Amino acid sequence: MKKNRKFTVVHGKRRGRTGEKLVYFLLTAVIVLFGIQAFYSFARDALTARFVRTVVVENGVLETIQSVEGVIVREERVVAAPATGKLEWLVGEGERLAIGTPVVRIKTADNNWQTVHTSVSGVIIMQLDGLEGVLQPQSMTEINVPLTRKIPFKPSRLSAGEEVRQGSLLFKIVDNFTWYYAIELTAGEYAGLSEQSSVTLRFSFAPDQDATGQPVVVEEDGDKVTLIFEMKDDVDGCFTQRLASADVITKRVRGIVLPTSALIERGDETGVYILEKSIVRYRPVDVIDTWQEEAVVSGLRIGFPVITNPNLVREGQRL
C-alpha cells in the first residue's frame, strides 16, 4: 500500500524587479524631459514669433535734419480804409492781383460807395498780425529772432458787412515772388550749414511740402548766428504764418533704410537677420550712413522681411 506524500510549495523571490523599476523610471524621466524640451522649444518659438517685429526691405531716403525756430519776413503793404462804413469784399483771400484791381468797397453813412484798389501787384491777404511794419526785408539785418518770437500778437481779419472806421487797416498785399525765413543758431549749429549754397526746408504749417531756401544774410554775434533764407517756393501758409518751426534738411542719402536696432555686429562685420521661408537667416550688409535711429545699407534683396529686434531670435530658428 502506497503512502500519500505531502509536498510543500516554497515561493521564491523574483529577481531583477528593482532593476526593471529603475529602467522604467529612467525611461519615463527621459521621455518627460524630451516632452518638456519639445514643449519649451515650441512655446518659445511661438512666443518669439508673437513679439518679433519686421520691416520689409525697400528703397528709401535717409534725411539729416536740423530742427529750428524762426520768423517769416515778407514784402508787405498794408492798406487802410479811406472812409467809415460797412465793408464789402470784392476778391477772395490768396488771389494774385494786378495793380489797380478793386479789392473792397465801403458803404458810407450817406449811402455812397468808396472802392479801394491795389496800388501794387501781389497776393491779397486779409489776415493782419501787427508785425507788418516791423518785419520788412530792408531791415532784416537788424532782426532779433528770439526777441521777435516773444512779441505778443493776435492775428485778426475783417468780415463782410463789418463796420470799419476811416484809417483802420483793411488788408495787405504781399509780394508773391520772394519771402524770407530768419533763424538764430549757435556757431556750432551754423557750422553744418555754412557750406550749403541752398537747403531744403519743411515747415510745421506745411509738413507735406518742401521748399528750397538760399542763405542771403548771415549776421554773427559771438556764439550766435542769425541766418536768413530767401524762399521762392509757395507753400501753404507762407503768406499768413509769422512764427514757424521748420526742419532744415542738410543731407539726403538714398538706399535701403532700416532701423539701427536691426543691425547686428559680428566682429568687424555688420549684418541683419531676415526671414526666408519662415527661417531666420543672417545676411551681411554695408552701412552707407546713419542718422539718429535709422541707417542706409546695401546688400539686401528688396522685399525680404528684416527683423528689427534680433535679440529675440537665433540664426536658423523657425518662426
Image: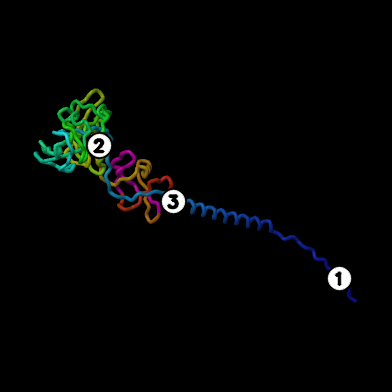
Residue lying at the far top of the rendered structure: 222
| Mark 2 / mark 3, whichever is N-terminal | 3
Residue 118 x %, y %: 11, 37
Mark 3 vs mark 1: in front? 3
Mark 2 vs mark 3: in front? 2
Residue 253 x %, y %: 25, 42
At a point 15% along the width and 43% down the height, the residue shown is 90
At a point 24% along the width and 31% down the height, the residue shown is 183
In the rendered image of this protein, does residue 53 appear above or below residue 11?
Answer: above
> Is 53 left, or right, of 234 in this rendering?
right
Q: Would you name the residue on which mark 1 appears?
A: 5
Q: Label 1: few (<14), some or many (≥20) within 10 Å?
A: few
Helix, strand or loop status at disc 1: loop
- Between 145 and 281, the residue placed more toward the observer is 145
Q: Main secondary structure of the magenta part?
A: strand
Residue 303 x %, y %: 31, 53
Q: Would you name the residue on which mark 3 appears?
A: 50
Q: Label 3: few (<14), some or many (≥20) within 10 Å?
A: few
